[in-house]
Image (cartoon, rainbow, N blue to C red):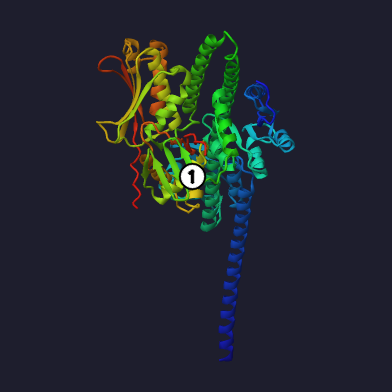
């Protein structure tokens, strides 16, 4: 594929040259403009010079690690950041997400998986976040009238359930940590436990999921939080 | 009369003076003892924290108490061990030593020139751990008791030092294991990430697609096996402790299907969760690993026919949930049955090893794995896990 003028520019940051080159080649093959950096310090210099549309970064790097980079990119603006992590490092993922990362992929990952995440983040970032009605296949969330319609019928939600659904739905495709949910829905009220979040999400799922064996909208991200997985319909 | 008054007064005054003098002498002696004890305490506790300084500590205590000899004996597992012995010294067979030690009461024997031999039990709080013997001393009881307490504190400190050194060594060995496993994990996964990315590129070259699919599927398996072995190694090394978390069965099934994109290659898998199934109290990553292994085994054992994942509360135990992986394959081979019953994994070949790994991982989080024949043909691989406490519904 040729690089389209105005193609999204993606900064790839990984200290392993083989992975970095392969990622850059794949992104270029999918029509993105890919830039490479081997550590967090070089990455931030390139970030400031080239203003990429998305940053894809490893977390463990020798000079200025990925966490540092996530924090600096987030302080500089809203550019989406996807982090590459390894299995079993949930604490790292939560830390990166709480620092402002938008998503993560777990090594080893397939190119399709990675490209899907990149597309979702670029699309999310391009969208108007202040829309009043969010439409998903089989589900609509009307933020102004506080109405939820699932499979054609209106669903009665408690205020807490609605607030959780609104938070997850407006961040569709993005993992939301328990801490972020407590912060946004309960405004960080002391004493709010992960268990309380779980109870509300459980009853929310029973109300909006047509088949509880195969959740279509809200899935659990173990040890991290939840992710709204349905693709939004075009506004 | 005046003379008598004067005599009485002078006798009284001289008596008073003598009493004052004695008091002054006593006070002086006590001051000297206090100073000596103070010096001893500084010596004992300003000394650097090193193991093996106890002998010096006891020697200093003996000198401070003006002893002609003596020593320190500690009891380890009931056996006396002489730490230090000065002058006329200690005899490990001295019956007074275990006596004083057991009774936790000091003992005194008269010695040459009006001095005493004193046996002090060394105890901080509970049972004595040793005896300090001070021979030929004239020191006062309180001073001796204080010296004994100081040496007892030194003994305790040495014990803590030894324990903390032991803990440090353990921590170091744990840290070493953790960093080794981390390095191995990184070293194994990095090339696999590269291989997968390379394969994805190769897939686009004409003619290579079929071979690439095979290699990709095998890489997926290899990657999962590495995960299995690393999880086992971590459990074994004690650097990984499963973290159970209330998890809906549907989420586990979904993640299991996601973990096997190539092995299942578009095969239909029926998923069902019985309506009254409670959330599971499991380590989600470990559970997905087990279910993915079981489902992959099922798909290899039964290359055609529907596969299924099913969750339901255990009919025998309300606090447990059954997660079944079902196939319509040829059923369980006798070798695997033997491995499932606890035989050596080597006897049963690959399937047996996979099963043994699943069982170990399941046990680590309070679950179990069993294979059984399925009515109408095929196999049920059953992971049974604890249920999470039922959450209390919000009342609005």
Residue A67 visible in this rendered orientation of the protein: yes
Q: What is the x, y in percent for residue B23?
A: 58, 69
- Residue farthest toward the front in the current orientation of the protein: A235
Between residues B114 and A130, which one lies in front from this camera angle?
Answer: A130
Q: What is the x, y in percent for residue B336?
A: 35, 13
Image: A229 above or below B128: above
Q: Is residue A206 left or right of residue A190?
A: left
Residue placed under numbered mark 1 in the picture: A133
Q: Residues within 10 Å of mark 1 (few under 14, many from 20)?
A: some
User: In the rendered image, which quarter is residue A94 located in?
Assistant: top right
The residue lying at 62 percent from left, 24 percent from top is: A30
Chain of the residue under the numbered disc 1 shown in the image: A
Image: B114 above or below B194: below
- Which quadrant is home to the N terminus of chain A? top right
Q: What is the x, y in percent for residue B290?
A: 41, 24
The residue lying at 66 percent from left, 45 percent from top is: A75
């Amino acid at each position: 594929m040729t690089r389209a003028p105005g193609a999204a520019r993606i900064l790839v940051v990984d200290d392993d040259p083989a992975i970095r080159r392969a990622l850059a080649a794949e992104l270029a093959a999918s029509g993105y403009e890919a830039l490479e950096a081997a550590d967090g310090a070089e990455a931030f210099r390139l970030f400031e010079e080239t203003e990429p549309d998305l940053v894809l970064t490893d977390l463990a790097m020798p000079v200025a690690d990925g966490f540092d980079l996530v924090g600096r990119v987030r302080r500089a603006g809203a550019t989406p950041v996807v982090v590459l992590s390894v299995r079993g490092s949930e604490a790292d993922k939560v830390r990166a997400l709480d620092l402002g990362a938008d998503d993560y992929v777990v090594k080893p990952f397939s190119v399709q998986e990675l490209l899907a995440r990149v597309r979702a983040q670029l699309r999310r970032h391009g969208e108007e976040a202040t829309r009043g009605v969010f439409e998903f296949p089989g589900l609509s969330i009307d933020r102004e009238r506080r109405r939820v319609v699932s499979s054609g019928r209106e669903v009665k939600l408690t205020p807490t359930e609605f607030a959780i659904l609104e938070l997850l739905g407006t961040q569709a495709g993005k993992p939301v940590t328990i801490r972020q949910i407590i912060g946004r829905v309960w405004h960080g009220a002391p004493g709010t436990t992960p268990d309380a979040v779980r109870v509300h999400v459980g009853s929310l799922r029973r109300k909006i999921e047509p088949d509880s064996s195969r959740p279509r909208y809200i899935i659990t991200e173990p040890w991290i939080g939840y992710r709204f997985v349905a693709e939004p319909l075009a506004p | 009369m005046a003379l008598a008054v004067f005599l009485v007064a002078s006798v009284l005054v001289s008596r008073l003076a003598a009493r004052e003098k004695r008091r002054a002498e006593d006070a002086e002696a006590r001051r000297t003892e206090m100073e000596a004890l103070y010096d001893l305490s500084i010596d004992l506790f300003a000394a650097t924290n090193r193991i093996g300084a106890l002998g010096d500590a006891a020697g200093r205590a003996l000198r401070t108490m003006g002893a002609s000899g003596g020593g320190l004996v500690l009891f380890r597992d009931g056996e006396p061990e002489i730490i230090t012995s000065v002058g006329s010294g200690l005899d490990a067979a001295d019956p007074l030593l275990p006596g004083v030690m057991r009774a936790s009461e000091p003992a005194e024997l008269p010695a040459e020139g009006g001095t005493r031999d004193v046996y002090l039990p060394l105890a901080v709080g509970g049972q004595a751990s040793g005896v300090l013997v001070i021979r030929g001393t004239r020191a006062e009881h309180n001073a001796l008791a204080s010296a004994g307490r100081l040496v007892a504190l030194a003994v305790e400190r040495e014990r803590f030092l030894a324990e903390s050194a032991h803990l440090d060594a353990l921590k170091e060995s744990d840290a070493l294991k953790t960093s080794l496993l981390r390095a191995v994990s990184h070293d194994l996964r990095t090339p696999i990430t590269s291989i997968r990315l390379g394969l994805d590129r190769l897939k686009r070259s004409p003619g290579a697609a079929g071979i690439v699919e095979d290699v990709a599927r095998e890489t997926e398996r290899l990657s999962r096996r590495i995960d299995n072995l690393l999880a086992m190694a971590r459990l074994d090394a004690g650097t990984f402790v499963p973290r159970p978390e209330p998890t809906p069965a549907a989420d586990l099934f979904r993640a299991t299907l996601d973990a096997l994109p190539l092995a299942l290659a578009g095969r239909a898998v029926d998923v069902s969760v019985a309506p009254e199934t409670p959330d599971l109290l499991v380590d989600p990553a470990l559970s997905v690993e087990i279910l993915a292994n079981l489902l992959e085994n099922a798909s290899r054992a039964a290359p055609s026919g529907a596969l299924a994942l099913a969750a339901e509360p255990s009919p025998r135990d309300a606090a447990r949930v059954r997660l079944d992986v079902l196939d319509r394959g040829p059923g369980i081979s006798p070798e695997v049955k033997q491995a499932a019953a606890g035989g050596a994994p080597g006897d049963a070949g690959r399937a047996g090893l996979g099963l043994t790994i699943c069982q170990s991982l399941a046990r680590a989080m309070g679950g179990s794995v069993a294979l059984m024949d399925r009515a109408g043909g095929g196999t049920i691989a059953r992971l049974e896990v604890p249920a999470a406490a039922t959450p209390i519904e919000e009342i609005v």
